[in-house]
Amino acid sequence: MIAGYLAPGDDVSHEAFKSAAEALHDCYLFDVTNDAMLAKSEQINVPGIALYKNFEEGKDVFEERTHESQVITTFVEAAGTPFVVKFLPETHAKLVNVRLEKHGQAVPKTDYEILGWTSTWLHLHRIC
């Protein structure tokens, strides 16, 4: 899941994020929030983007050039793993390395992970 933590009046970043979301919506889930307290609790500077995942660090944060949709797209494609991926020799290493479990999606294993994901998702609303 990719979450945009954007200021309410930052139309340029909102448009860039929306453009990236529209370009990648078949492979990734995008959400956006204007909640400054949520951003602070997630330790993300506004404007910023977080790519949440259930492996490695748990999330990748991007806080630069949020006004450029192509830069956002590049960040998501480099840091993320799509929901659906063709299993080919070229994609095998990436899929195995991120330990995808269920139909190409990262799945929370513990109650803590489920509650953490749920509390974050409740504060976000879907834009695509």
Image (cartoon, rainbow, N blue to C red):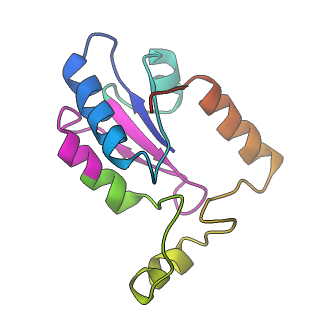
Answer above or below: position of 119 versus 28.
above
Seen from the viewer's position, the closer of residues 7 and 103 is 103
Task: Say which residue appears at 64% left-offset and 25% top-offset.
Answer: 122
Q: Is residue 7 above or below residue 128?
A: above
On the picture, is 26 further left or further right than 98? left
Instruction: Please provide percent x and percent y for residue 35.
Output: 47, 16
Asked if the stretch drawn in magenta spans residue 64, the answer is yes
Residue at far right of view: 111
Asked if the stretch drawn in magenta spans residue 91, the answer is: no
- Given residues 111 and 1, the one toward you in this image is 1
* Residue placed most toward the observer, 37 or 6: 6
Boundaries of the magenta span: 48-73
Q: How many marks?
A: 0
Q: Residue furthest top?
A: 9
Q: How far across and how far down the image is residue 93, in percent?
A: 46, 83
Farthest residue to the bottom: give it. 89
Percent x, y for residue 114? 75, 43
| Among the 4 quarters of the image, the one containing residue 61 | top left
The residue drawn where x is 45% and y is 33% is: 128
Foreground pick, 18 / 67: 18
The answer to whether residue 32 is left or right of residue 98 is left
* Apparent side of residue 28 relative to residue 114 in the rendered image (left or right): left
**What residue lies at 35% left-to-right and 52% top-to-bottom?**
76
**Horizontal relation, residue 100 to residue 29: left or right:** right
Return the x and y of residue 49 as percentages of the image width and height: 37, 37
